[in-house]
Image (tube, grey):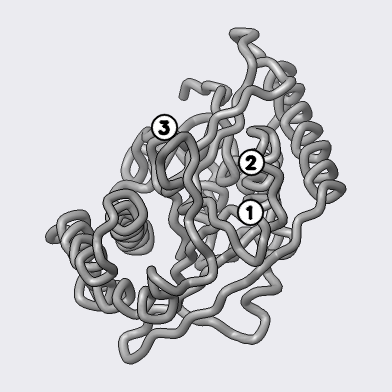
Amino acid sequence: MSSHFPVIWDSTMLASLRACRQQFEYSHVQHLKIKGTSVHLHAGAAFAKALEVTRLSYYGENRSPNESLARGVQALIKEYGDFDPGSSAKSLDRMVGALEFYFSEYPLDSDPARVITLAGKPAVEFSFAIPLPLNHPDSGEPLVLAGRFDAVVEFAGGIYPNDEKTTSSLGSSWSKQWEMRGQFVGYCWALRELGIPPAGMIVSGISILKTKYEQQRAIIPTPNWKIDAWFADTMGEIEEAIGRYKAGAPIRKNWSEACNAYGACPYKQLCSVEDPQVWIDTYYEVRPWNPLKVVEATP
């Protein structure tokens, strides 16, 4: 199977590289994905689209909160389509309810986290693509770190990237899991590189169950030393990946609990058999990951 070292990198790829080199190889070098669509990815993408439309309607078109939310609901229904969620709580009606719940907890006209304006437009669905001081091992062109998050907001006198996370449960430790999340430090790095010094990261969580919704908001200070440390570590990890790729080094598996985390690695079966090609031909397809076009969602 052909391999192509990625030019564009993002937090999903970095997390995969850190979790398991074999997972990274399958997912982001060979570009293998399980056939079909995850309900978590589909519902998350529909929810993200609804948030985008609602905010742009309110902040960009000066529509009322109620009209903006109605437009967001319409966008969610269109994006969700006739997808079958099976027994998942993330059905269309529950996702519509989640959107309404979200804006009842964080009202457009009174939420203290206010979307800012950049280049004359509301900073909603903020995307970035920034060249890195590393070159592609085949072409020699600069590698690029890219990403997308829900909004840039002003909160308590500071500027923050803001991202929403849908989940099945929120507990007392939910907000603590983000303190060392490279994804969010990377968002702060990107804003700083673009000349917008961030005070930290805001993560707004909403749990979607069959009988109720819950919400939490985490405010994560992200000082410059932390951003610098993240960037240095990240460059070192990508450099190591380049070196292994150029040397044709054997791909090492993780052999740890990472194989079972988050409902099990999607490539676990491939690592459990001597010859994975039959499984690849039957259950996987080649789908390159483009961070600038794909809305990231997590279960």
Label 3 sits on a secondary structure element that is loop
Q: In the image as oriented, which residue stretches furthest toward the left?
A: 82
Q: Earlier in the sequence, mark 1 or mark 2?
A: 1
Q: Report the front residue among 56 and 229.
A: 56
Label 2 sits on a secondary structure element that is helix
Residue at position x 33%, y 76% from top? 98
Q: Earlier in the sequence, mark 3 or mark 1?
A: 1
Q: Which residue is mark 3?
A: 288
* Residue 152, above or below 136: below
Question: Is disc 1 surrounded by few (<14), some (14 to 19) or many (20+) residues within 10 Å?
Answer: many
Question: Is disc 2 surrounded by few (<14), some (14 to 19) or many (20+) residues within 10 Å?
Answer: some
- Give amino acid for label 3: Pro
Report whether residue 253 is seen.
Answer: no
Q: Which residue is mark 1?
A: 159
Q: Report the front residue among 92 and 163.
A: 163
**Residue 223 x, y percent position in the rendering:** 81, 53
Q: Report the front residue among 151 and 95.
A: 151
Which of label 1 and label 2 is nearer to you? 1
Q: In which quarter of the view is residue 228 placed? A: top right
* Residue 299, above or below 236: below
In 3D space, how far apart are the residues under numbered discs 1 and 2 (Cα atoms)?
9 Å
Badge 1 vs badge 2, beta-carbon distance below 8 Å: yes
* Residue 116, above or below 69: above
Q: Report the front residue among 16 and 250.
A: 16
Question: Is disc 3 surrounded by few (<14), some (14 to 19) or many (20+) residues within 10 Å?
Answer: some
Quarter of the picture containing the C terminus is bottom left
Q: In which quarter of the view is residue 146 placed? A: top right
Q: Earlier in the sequence, mark 3 or mark 2?
A: 2
Report whether residue 4 is seen.
Answer: yes
Q: Which residue is mark 2?
A: 191
